[in-house]
């Protein structure tokens, strides 16, 4: 039997970029499926959990991000299923400022694992919370975009980076209390 802390409550909602979905547990945000042309029905299969049970405030914060009104999220997250290395990578990636980038190698050095750039790339690919843990901001050391684990791949990564560069003046912080 699942505990309440690990039970996922999902919400599917419309953003300026299309349909999006989140999964929330008693520990925090656990899953985010970014808008990439999927309909509500397809998203329900991706997210798992009881649809329309997830946080309305979390959905509002994500909607505000895609409208250019949010730059940062300081929220509780549930990294169940990730290794300690993957969690360290995600925690470091979460520190990358809006509209800026860091290289895979830079993230590896910052977590005390110089030379682990490829492992960082693998960990970033497992990030269950794109946008909140802004894996689109991690690029190759030569300035190339690298990969992106999404339906449209690197095209979505480029779109997100360009979007953030255009919207640098906007800011609103969502804190942990907003996600309950």
Image (cartoon, rainbow, N blue to C red):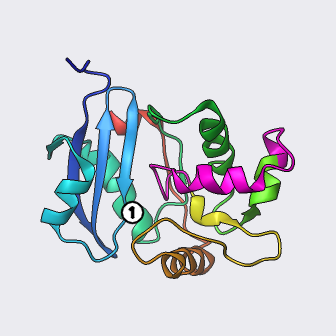
Please give left or right for residue 90 compared with residue 149 in the image: right
User: Measured along the vertical axis of the image, is residue 166 above or below residue 72?
Assistant: below
Give, as a single range, the part of the protein colored magenta: 109-133
Q: Secondary structure at mark 1?
A: helix
- Nearer to the camera, 170 or 17: 17
Please give left or right for residue 58 compared with residue 163 in the image: left
x, y (%) of residue 44?
Answer: 17, 55
Residue 36 drawn in magenta: no
Q: Which quarter of the figure is the N terminus placed in?
A: top left
- Nearer to the camera, 120 or 179: 120
Q: Which quarter of the figure is the C terminus placed in?
A: top left
Residue 131 drawn in magenta: yes
Q: Residue at x 34, y 62 (%)?
A: 63
User: Measured along the vertical axis of the image, is residue 134 above or below residue 78?
Assistant: below
x, y (%) of residue 92?
Answer: 69, 45
Label 1: how many residues lie within 10 Å, few (<14), some (14-19) or many (20+)?
Answer: some
**Residue 8 in which image quadrant:** top left
x, y (%) of residue 69?
Answer: 46, 66
Q: How many marks?
A: 1
Please give left or right for residue 33 compared with residue 168 in the image: left
Q: Residue at x 74, y 59 (%)?
A: 104
Residue on which disc 1 sits:
64
**Residue 28 in which image quadrant:** top left
x, y (%) of residue 66?
Answer: 41, 69
Please give left or right for residue 24 compared with residue 148 in the image: left
């Amino acid at each position: 039997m699942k505990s309440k802390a690990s039970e996922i409550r999902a919400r599917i909602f419309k953003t300026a970029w299309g349909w999006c979905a989140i999964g929330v547990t008693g520990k925090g945000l656990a899953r985010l499926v970014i808008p990439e042309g999927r309909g509500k029905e397809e998203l329900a299969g991706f997210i798992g959990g009881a649809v329309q049970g997830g946080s309305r405030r979390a959905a509002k914060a994500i909607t505000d991000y895609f409208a250019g009104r949010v730059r940062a999220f300081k929220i509780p997250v549930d990294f169940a299923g990730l290794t300690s290395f993957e969690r360290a990578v995600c925690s470091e990636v979460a520190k990358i400022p809006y509209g800026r980038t860091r290289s895979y190698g830079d993230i590896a050095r910052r977590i005390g694992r110089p030379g682990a750039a490829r492992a960082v790339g693998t960990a970033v690919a497992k990030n269950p919370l794109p946008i909140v843990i802004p894996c689109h901001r991690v690029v190759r050391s030569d300035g190339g975009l690298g990969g992106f684990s999404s339906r449209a791949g690197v095209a979505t990564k480029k779109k997100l980076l360009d979007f953030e560069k255009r919207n640098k003046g906007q800011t609103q912080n969502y804190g942990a209390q907003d996600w309950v």
